[in-house]
Image (cartoon, rainbow, N blue to C red):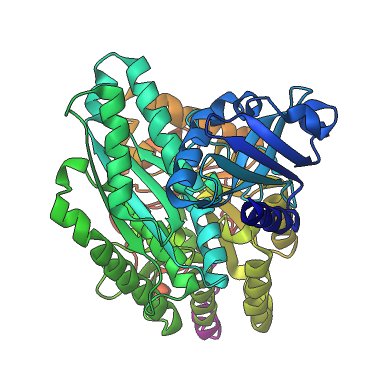
């Protein structure tokens, strides 16, 4: 008994070096001892907790989660601190970090310590800016986008603390059929149990995700055995469904590798999650799952190094395509597009750089190359405006803007020949800050355009909250509007919005005269597409003397040519 008391006193001392509340509970959850600050829970002395069930204080969302934590505590003797939500005496939800320990000398009692996090989390809104905790779904799991952010943050912290990390990806066959069976109650209970377990093994209880209906991901410490995970998930499925219609398969990605530094490990994590999300569960086999980690990491490392090589060695070409005034087909400005040797789809390359967080470096390299081209041709008298595509998210980064301004500085007035064409505005949350940045560039003489208006990558909020000079209409409307009344209505709506905002409109992907006449007749001033010219390395091809031979230029009364 003396030895047990000494062990317990040591644990209490250890716990209270950081904790605010310490509880001793039995295997049923009844509190047998309490020390520390309990006023927030019961509104009276800490002794009032004794004899009560701890489950009474756990929020309904976390009861099953807490059950899984206790199960792990009994199996492994200790749990790392993790977030848990308790109900306060006033009805408010308390978010606390809970650690646990099982004394070898007393297996009938569990010891829990609770700490108020240094910065209480704030539930995020739909426009999560990355600085607040993302809101989990009703099962307590994050969606894929939220999981990317949380897992990257946790992986980065683990790497800095020299802690090994693993990402376990699971496929639960049969959940899709269960969802279609018309038994939402059974599906809901299965997901609740699975979610509780995955949260219980994840870092802090916050890095577990429902990637898709049959796919789940969890970032956890390296010591958690894969066999244990599969067996526990299979046990839950058997208890809830009671037949063999559901099967679990899993594999893990180990980010403790000499080939991946901290930065590349996070990039590989994001890429691996996307590939896992996009792959049909039926394509997974046990062998492919077992070898999947190595394949994904090798592929991620290869692609990341390829992007880095392109950026550092400037191993890309810039081609230029004209944007013309539709009424006389004279060049208004050019758009700079990239071509990369050995890569058939520049768009796929750009999407990958955006996904793994390397787009800012590429945007800076592209800007440098375009300015160098403009400088080289300026002496010949050819001074076109050139639009460069920049990720809107890049322009929300103060570090990017500082680097961007450093690149502009040596080129003096040449900067005024640039137009910023914003892409991916749907990923922006702080439009007020972005608008301030854009206005500073506009005031210095740089025009701004929002790309792909009408597409899913462009946020409607960007049209209302950002003051710009041009809107570029997504290319599908030029052809689809002739065949589809719905697309015609959407096209007219976009054009009307542009007129109301007082900006000029650009229609892209114009390939024939009928498309050009259609958008011009609806009030679009500018056009881009193969009808007017293909991308070319030598943009002097499109000097002011350029005119098309097969369609006589016509200047209509009331219009005059401008240069943006």
Identify whether 28 is placed above or below 109.
Answer: above
Residue 324, horizontal then vertical, whole percent: 45, 55
Residue found 14% across the figure and 49% down from its top: 285
Residue found 33% across the figure and 18% down from its top: 186
Looking at this view, name the residue that lies furthest to the top: 182
Q: Nearer the viewer, residue 88 or 339?
A: 88
Residue found 41% across the figure and 57% down from its top: 270
Residue 336, horizontal then vertical, whole percent: 45, 66
Residue 366, horizontal then vertical, whole percent: 48, 73
Looking at this view, name the residue that lies furthest to the right: 44
**Residue 504 visible in rendering:** yes
- Look at the image and give the residue range highlighted in magenta: 373-386
Residue found 66% across the figure and 27% down from its top: 57
Q: Is residue 68 shown left or right of residue 157?
A: left
Identify whether 409 is placed above or below 295.
Answer: below
Quarter location, residue 15: bottom right
Quarter location, residue 496: top right
Q: Nearer the viewer, residue 77 or 196?
A: 77
Instruction: State yes or no: residue 379 in magenta.
Output: yes
- Where's the C terminus, which quadrant? bottom right
Q: Nearer the viewer, residue 157 or 163?
A: 163
Instruction: State yes or no: residue 545 in magenta.
Output: no
**Residue 277 visible in rendering:** no
């Amino acid at each position: 008994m003396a030895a047990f008391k000494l062990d317990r006193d040591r644990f209490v001392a250890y716990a209270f070096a950081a904790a605010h509340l310490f509880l001793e509970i039995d295997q049923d959850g009844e509190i047998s001892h309490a020390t520390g600050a309990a006023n927030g829970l019961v509104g009276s002395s800490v002794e009032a907790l004794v004899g009560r069930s701890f489950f009474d204080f756990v929020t309904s969302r976390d009861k099953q989660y807490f059950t899984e934590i206790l199960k792990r505590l009994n199996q492994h003797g200790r749990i790392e601190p993790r977030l848990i939500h308790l109900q306060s005496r006033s009805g408010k939800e308390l978010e606390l970090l809970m650690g646990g320990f099982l004394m070898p000398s007393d297996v009938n009692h569990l010891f829990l310590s609770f700490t108020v996090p240094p910065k209480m989390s704030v539930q995020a809104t739909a426009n999560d800016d990355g600085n607040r905790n993302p809101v989990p779904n009703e099962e307590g799991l994050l969606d894929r986008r939220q999981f990317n952010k949380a897992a990257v943050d946790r992986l980065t912290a683990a790497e800095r603390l020299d802690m090994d990390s693993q990402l376990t990806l699971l496929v639960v066959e049969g959940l899709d059929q269960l969802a279609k069976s018309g038994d939402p109650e059974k599906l809901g209970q299965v997901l609740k149990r699975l979610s509780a377990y995955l949260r219980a093994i994840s870092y802090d209880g916050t890095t577990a995700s429902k990637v898709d209906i049959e796919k789940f991901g969890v970032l956890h410490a390296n010591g958690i055995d894969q066999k244990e995970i599969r067996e526990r998930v299979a046990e839950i499925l058997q208890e809830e469904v009671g037949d063999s219609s559901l099967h679990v398969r899993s594999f893990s990605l180990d980010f403790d590798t000499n080939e991946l530094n901290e930065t590349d490990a996070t990039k590989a994590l994001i890429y691996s999650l996307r590939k896992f999300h996009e792959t049909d569960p039926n394509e997974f086999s046990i062998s492919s799952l077992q070898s999947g980690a190595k394949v994904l990491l090798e592929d991620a490392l290869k692609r990341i190094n390829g992007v880095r090589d392109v950026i550092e060695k400037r191993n890309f070409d810039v081609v230029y395509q004209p944007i013309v005034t539709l009424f006389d087909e004279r060049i208004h400005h050019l758009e700079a597009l990239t071509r990369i040797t050995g890569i058939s789809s520049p768009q796929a390359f750009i999407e990958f750089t955006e996904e793994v967080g390397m787009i800012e470096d590429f945007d800076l390299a592209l800007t440098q190359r375009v300015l160098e081209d403009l400088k080289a041709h300026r002496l010949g008298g050819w001074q076109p405006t050139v639009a460069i595509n920049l990720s809107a998210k890049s322009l929300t980064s103060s570090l990017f803007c500082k680097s961007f301004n450093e690149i502009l500085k040596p080129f003096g007035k040449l900067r005024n020949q640039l137009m910023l064409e914003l892409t991916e505005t749907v990923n922006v949350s702080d439009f007020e800050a972005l608008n301030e940045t854009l206005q500073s560039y506009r005031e210095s003489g740089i025009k701004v355009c929002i790309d792909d208006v009408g597409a899913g990558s462009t946020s409607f909020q960007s049209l209302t909250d950002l003051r710009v000079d041009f809107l570029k209409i997504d290319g599908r409307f030029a052809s689809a509007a002739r065949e589809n009344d719905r697309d015609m209505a959407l096209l007219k709506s976009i054009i009307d919005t542009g007129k109301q905002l007082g900006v000029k409109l650009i229609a892209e992907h114009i390939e024939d005269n009928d498309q050009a006449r259609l958008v011009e007749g609806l009030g679009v001033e500018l056009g881009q597409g193969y009808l007017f010219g293909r991308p070319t390395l030598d943009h002097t091809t499109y000097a002011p003397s350029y005119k098309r031979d097969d369609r006589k230029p016509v200047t209509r009364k009331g219009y005059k040519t401008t240069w943006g």
